[in-house]
């Protein structure tokens, strides 16, 4: 497939805001290419990516480097390119203005750019490391630009910096696939969704043109899937209403979700964002090898940190360093040991166990996991129909410092996503939200070199709207948790622009924020502001899909009023 065809498709899709129209445009395009038997990898490009979604590698090109590349390839002055970017705010447009490769060569000389050329080159760029990496990356980008028309350069550039700006989400692609191959049938659409959450690979899904082919997609140890999520309940009564009676109650550990895969002895560890964290947790790998029985499996767990001397459990923030840190791992693992609390199993010795009722899956967990306190254990659980018993289990969990309890329906299968009635969470009403940082400002005095004030936002559909500024909660020293210095480094990497002292960043970094109350405010784009906000944790394990929505904010506001 020619890259130009994708570019024309991008433009057509960008030309309408109506979801249905977009799905139809895409379905027409797919129909045409299905006839030719085209490889479906081009769909990654449509999502603004070059790797499948289960592979969280990024091209690793910052906006600054992209600007350099545009200047380098076009022979323009870097300052001039930068200035144009500052006024336009879209790197794609900068590339479109300055890159005009097609004009330099005659039509015959020009080697046609294929979609696969763009994918493969960007993949190679992401792998370049070590000495002279920047120069080699610049050369490869220049090579691509030299073959591109200016419109192609626009989209190549946006893909390079992971900012496609045409609003194509995977759900829309699934809609289009349902239209193309399944006559828009509702049950096929549900199956597409399920298999997509399982495989996280849009090209694989689009290659399945029948229910039979789709059904063959299965879990594969070594390849991350999404996880089952919980709905919130307000009290024990509601917990039983939601999950049935009797139900299983488990402690809600304050750690982070880890999906543990064993593919014939090869262990890999994934966060719920699908990030592979195996190399950060050699202790977990060892604990699994020694204490979980089976040739191949996928188990679901919460990993919790504890104080090595006192063996007191520590809140998530204390161990978030273990996800972030990529060096001196063996020291860190001694200072911040973790316990694996296994609460589910999705796959065992060559077979999916997702369809088994939870009760059966739990039995399997108990059978295969050896209990070694402070290393690994099945999550602490009771099964009860008594409100009194459930209530006291909940209070015991709170007393020992856990966040609350999780409630699970005994006969429910495992499903990816948020299913009503399968799993619920109960915790005391605390004023906190997970939010994403969209902007930052420099500190003053002692903190002058750092970005110390953060503009945070919640979700509103597929947009983000601001809900306040938060400048307290991070630390000055690493031992105490996430520092201003480290956050500053992370933010600089994703900087988009800077104006009047406010740095705008890509919405990527998720933080948990507590606050006193919510009030209406014209100062922020959501129309609301959090009063006295404070960051309690940086959440590298969560994505922007997990953050609070404007609806959530409105609900709390109404209730408090
Ligand atoms: P929340 O993050 O507030 O939506 O709560 C759900 C999260 O609690 C899950 O995604 C897990 O990471 C975590 N969790 C802690 N303990 C358990 C447990 N026993 N069963 C399931 N999830 C748990």
Image (cartoon, rainbow, N blue to C red):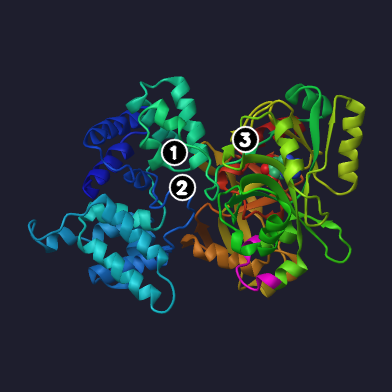
Cβ–Cβ under 8 Å for marks 1 and 2: yes
Q: Which residue is mark 2?
A: 53
Q: Is residue 246 above or below residue 336?
A: above
Q: Position of residue 556 (x, y in %)?
A: 71, 34
- Choose mark 1 or mark 2, whichever is in front: 2
Q: Which residue is mark 3?
A: 353
Instruction: Name the image quarter holding the C terminus.
Output: top right
Q: Secondary structure at mark 3?
A: loop
- Choose mark 2 or mark 3, whichever is in front: 3
Magenta region includes residue 325: yes
**Which region of the structure is painted magenta?**
323-330
* Separation of residues labelled 2 and 3 (CA atoms): 24 Å
346 or 266, nearer to the observer: 266
Is disc 1's CB within 8 Å of ligand 1?
A: no
Q: Which mark is residue 170?
A: 1
Cβ–Cβ under 8 Å for marks 1 and 3: no
Q: Residue furthest bottom?
A: 131
Q: Say whether residue 347 is left or right of residue 216.
A: right
Residue at 87%, 66% (x, y): give it: 309
Q: Position of residue 59 (x, y in %)?
A: 41, 60
Q: Residues within 10 Å of mark 3 (few under 14, many from 20)?
A: many
């Amino acid at each position: 497939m020619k890259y130009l065809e994708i570019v024309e498709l991008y433009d057509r899709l960008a030309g309408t805001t109506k979801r249905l129209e977009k799905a139809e445009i895409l379905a027409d395009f797919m129909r045409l290419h299905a006839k030719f038997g085209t490889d479906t990898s081009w769909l990654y490009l449509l999502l603004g990516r070059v790797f499948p979604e289960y592979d969280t590698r990024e091209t690793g090109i910052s906006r600054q480097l992209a600007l350099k590349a545009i200047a380098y390839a076009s022979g323009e002055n870097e300052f001039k390119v930068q200035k144009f970017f500052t006024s336009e705010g879209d790197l794609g447009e900068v590339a479109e203005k300055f890159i005009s490769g097609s004009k330099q060569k005659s039509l015959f000389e020009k080697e046609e750019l294929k979609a696969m050329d763009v994918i493969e080159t960007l993949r190679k760029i992401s792998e370049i490391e070590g000495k002279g990496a920047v120069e080699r990356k610049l050369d490869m980008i220049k090579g691509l630009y030299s073959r591109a028309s200016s419109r192609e350069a626009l989209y190549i550039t946006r893909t390079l910096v992971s900012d496609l700006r045409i609003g194509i989400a995977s759900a829309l692609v699934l809609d289009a696939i349902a239209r193309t191959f399944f006559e828009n049938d509702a049950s096929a659409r549900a199956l597409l969704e399920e298999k997509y959450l399982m495989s996280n690979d849009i090209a694989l899904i689009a290659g399945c043109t029948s229910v039979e082919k789709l059904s063959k997609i299965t879990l594969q140890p070594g390849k991350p899937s999404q996880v089952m999520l919980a709905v919130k309940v307000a009290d024990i009564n509601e917990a039983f209403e939601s999950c049935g009676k009797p139900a299983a109650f488990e402690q809600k550990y304050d750690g982070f979700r880890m999906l543990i895969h064993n593919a014939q002895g090869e262990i890999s560890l994934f966060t719920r964002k699908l990030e592979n964290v195996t190399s950060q947790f050699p202790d977990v790998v060892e604990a699994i090898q020694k204490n979980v029985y089976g040739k191949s499996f996928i188990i679901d767990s919460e990993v919790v940190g504890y104080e090595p001397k006192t063996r007191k459990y520590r809140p998530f923030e204390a161990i978030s360093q273990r996800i972030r840190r990529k060096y001196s791992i063996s020291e860190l693992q001694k200072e911040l040991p973790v316990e694996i609390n296994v609460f589910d199993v999705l796959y065992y010795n060559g077979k999916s166990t997702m369809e088994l009722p939870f009760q059966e899956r739990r039995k399997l967990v108990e059978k295969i996991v050896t209990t070694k306190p402070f290393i690994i254990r099945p999550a602490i659980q009771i099964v009860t129909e008594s409100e009194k018993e459930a209530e006291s289990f909940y209070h015991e969990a709170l007393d020992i410092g856990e966040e609350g309890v999780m409630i699970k329906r005994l006969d429910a299968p495992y499903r990816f996503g948020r299913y009503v009635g399968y799993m619920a969470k109960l915790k005391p009403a605390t004023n906190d939200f997970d939010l994403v940082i969209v902007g930052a400002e420099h500190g003053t005095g002692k903190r002058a070199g750092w970005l110390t004030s953060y503009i945070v936002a919640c979700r509103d559909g597929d947009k983000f709207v601001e809900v306040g500024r938060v400048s307290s909660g991070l630390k000055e020293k690493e031992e105490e948790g996430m520092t201003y210095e480290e956050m500053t480094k992370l933010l600089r990497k994703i900087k988009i622009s800077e104006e009047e002292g406010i740095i705008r960043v890509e919405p990527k970094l998720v933080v948990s924020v507590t606050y006193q109350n919510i009030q209406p405010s014209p100062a922020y784009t959501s129309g609301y502001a959090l009063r006295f906000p404070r960051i309690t944790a940086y959440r590298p394990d969560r994505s922007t899909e997990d953050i609070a929505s404007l609806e959530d904010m409105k609900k709390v506001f109404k209730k408090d009023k």
